[in-house]
Image (cartoon, helix red, strand yellow):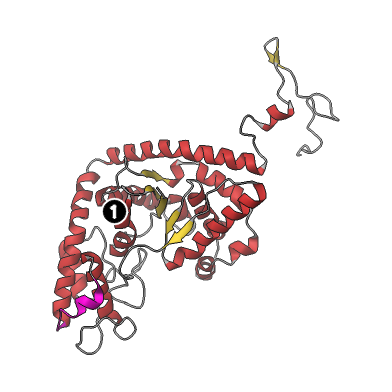
Amino acid sequence: MPRRLTGFTPSGNLHLDNYLCAMRPIIAEQARTDTVVFISDLHALTLEHDAADVRRRTLEFATLLLAAGADPDGCLFLVQSHVPEHTELHYLLECTTGYGEAQRMIQFKEKSRRQQQVRMSLLTYPILMAADILLYDTDEVPVGEDQRQHAELARDLACRFNTRYGRTFTVPRAVNPPVAARIMDLAAPGEKMSKSSSSTAGALRLLDEPDVLRRKVMRAVTDTGSEVIYDPERKPGISNLLAILASCTSDEPERLAQLFDRYGELKEAVADAVVATLTPVRERYVELARDPEHVRAVLHAGAKRAREQAGEKVRQAKAAIGLRHPSGSLHQLRGDVRPRVGGQREPDRHPGGAAGQHPPDLPTRA
């Protein structure tokens, strides 16, 4: 059974594209795949953020995932920062990554241009993502085009580490999300639907009321002319509406286009489909949100399970890279740990030095 991993960064508002491309496939596949689902709260720190907002959205995203049908008994469900092995492996992988390699990441180039002060965490974020993936021996990583380069970096680092230090990591592969078409912004169909968009008109948010969802669809940008056809190049607005309808109903946009003569008819059908798709998720969210301690307990249990697996993987990586032997510490292997004499530990003695002195390769710091 292949292991598949998906992460959600708690920033902005989860929307229809997140649900169709990431959340719904998790629910459909969790019985047939070994699934890892996590809230990547550490990734939310790479840009300017509000601490209270990160905490609030971490719980909100976890609750929404449960509302959408994520089964904590059927998958590994956790918050990234609750498992410190993520950051521990992150550093080990940094030691096998070139500076130029990290700097070439397209997202780093794009985001750093928009920032007056670029944080180091933005540069190393793809390496943390690689640690997220490799920590759980992931086989498949569903990613969009904007994250494919990062998934390929994880693959490269796994191969490099295995070649240099011995086989330690499963080499992952990027897979396309199983969705009919990419969902774009309703107000700007040339741009993808975004969690962080400054405009609320273009994104169909999971927590929007049904009447809000319907109003956004009815006000969606369309194209010149009146013909309903699926042609993303010539008719991006209408094609986006057809893609949404196709994704919500598991149909084909080209076939659906033949069912409508007017834009208004199409918009009505899309609004009905979106409301039918998202309302059950929102209603279940409202129920779960009444008991946040239950959600926290689920996350605590998930972190405990995750640490059992993650801890073993970090131990393997440390042994491979030279920090720790699987049957004992380096001190024990070198004979540096002396038995206690009369209840007191005998001072360590290092070659070329008296008792209590630092070994020659570890100079004393001022």
Q: Position of residue 83 (x, y in %)?
A: 46, 41
Q: Residue furthest bottom?
A: 225
Q: Residue furthest right?
A: 352
Instruction: Let me know if residue 32 is in the magenta part.
Output: no
Report the span colored magenta.
252-262
Whether residue 257 is situated above or below residue 334 in the rendered picture: below
Give whichever of 35, 235 is nearer the camera.
Answer: 35
Whether residue 106 is situated above or below residue 128 in the rendered picture: below
Q: Amino acid at mark 1?
A: Ala
Give whichever of 25, 237 is nearer the camera.
Answer: 25
Q: Position of residue 226 (x, y in %)?
A: 19, 88
Q: Write the residue at 53% across / 65% down.
A: 108
Question: The C terminus appears in which quarter of the rendering?
Answer: top right
Residue 72 in view in this figure: yes
Q: Position of residue 63 (x, y in %)?
A: 29, 48
Choose top left, top right, bottom left or bottom right for residue 225.
Answer: bottom left
Instruction: Let me know if residue 260 is in the magenta part.
Output: yes
Look at mark 1 in the image and give the residue it sits on: 28
Q: Write the residue at 46% across / 35% down.
A: 308
Query: How many labels were placed on the picture?
Result: 1
User: Regarding mark 1 in the picture, which secondary structure is present there?
Assistant: helix
Question: 266 left or right of 310?
Answer: left
Q: Write the residue at 36% across / 62% down.
A: 177
Whether residue 113 is situated above or below residue 231 in the rendered picture: above
Give whichever of 55, 40 is nearer the camera.
Answer: 40
How many residues crowd mark 1 within 10 Å: few (<14), some (14–19), many (20+)? few
